[in-house]
Amino acid sequence: MVPVCILFFAALQAQNTSVIFVPPAQYNLSSYKTIEQSYKPPQGFSRVWVAAGSFAAYLRALPLVKDSINVLDFKNRVFKKSTDSSLAAVVPVNISGKRLWQCMDILIRFHVDYLQKNPKTAISYPLPDGTPFSWQEWQQGMRPIFKGLSFSKVHKSNTDSSLKNFTRYLNTIFEYSGTQSFWHHYPDIHLKDIHPGDFIVKKGRNGHAVLIVDIAENSKGQKIALIGQGDTPACQFYLLKQKDGNTWFTIDTKSDYPLLPIKKKMFWAGLRRFPE
């Protein structure tokens, strides 16, 4: 039987535009397991139902490296040591040279990867004024023009569906948009409706974003979550853990914020969801 990790990377390599992970030869292939395989819910909890082919299902199938691995930044420097008490595991994102793949941007890149495999929804994200701007528009030659406090779109190029042009589109989204675009122009998600694949954005000048990677629930309706993040400068995506080693964070509906082992305080008021 072919290991699931080999099938996973073979599928990725067959779609060059969606390969965002480090080639398996750079790590010990046997160390790869998916998020779902790696983190079972604690006793009394079960993973919440997610639809097959959903963004949540995609996240559960992401590969992880857990054993003594540092988080690398876009210059291949150590961003966070494997011994850091807040580091649970690393999703081996190929971050080398990707200086724009920062906290919110790397979440967008996961979502793009998902949409390329499940093309039910157009690849489109908001510009800072809320104007939606899609890959389809970009490949047809449309470009965003900043005027005053708003954006307009003008035709400036020939049709180009190449990988290089797709990368230009994503980099434009990363350069123009950020956490504040998603704070202001994506609808609020009520905490009681939280779902794997949702993310929290921090409002204000020093914005940040964390991803709700997975959720489990017990018979009393209490929920816990796996939570991960990228950061600034751009670095590989990694899962967080508490000081006691627990990777499942309590979702307390009576609190305004989750208790996370990071410097920037995240508030549930920033809970948002990508369209599928």
Image (tube, rainbow, N blue to C red):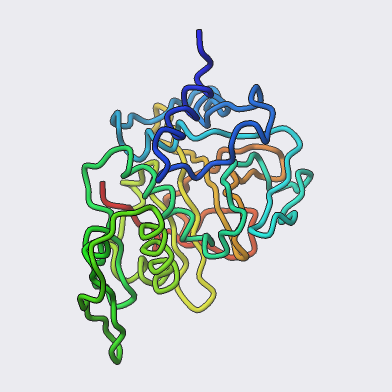
The correct choice, above or below, for 34 with respect to 104 in the image is above
* Residue at image coords 54%, 22%: 43
The correct choice, above or below, for 238 with respect to 166 in the image is above
- Judged left or right of residue 137, residue 113 is right
Q: Position of residue 57 (x, y in %)?
A: 37, 33
Q: Position of residue 159 (x, y in %)?
A: 23, 62
Q: Position of residue 129 (x, y in %)?
A: 29, 78
Residue found at the very far top of the displayed protein:
1
* Residue at image coords 56%, 29%: 39
* Residue at image coords 49%, 23%: 44
Taking depth in this image into account, of 186 and 151 the one nearest to the observer is 151
Q: Quadrant of residue 272?
A: bottom left
Q: Position of residue 59 (x, y in %)?
A: 44, 38
**How many marks are shown on the rendered structure?**
0
* Residue at image coords 72%, 32%: 67
Residue found at the very far front of the displayed protein:
158
The correct choice, above or below, for 232 with respect to 240 in the image is below
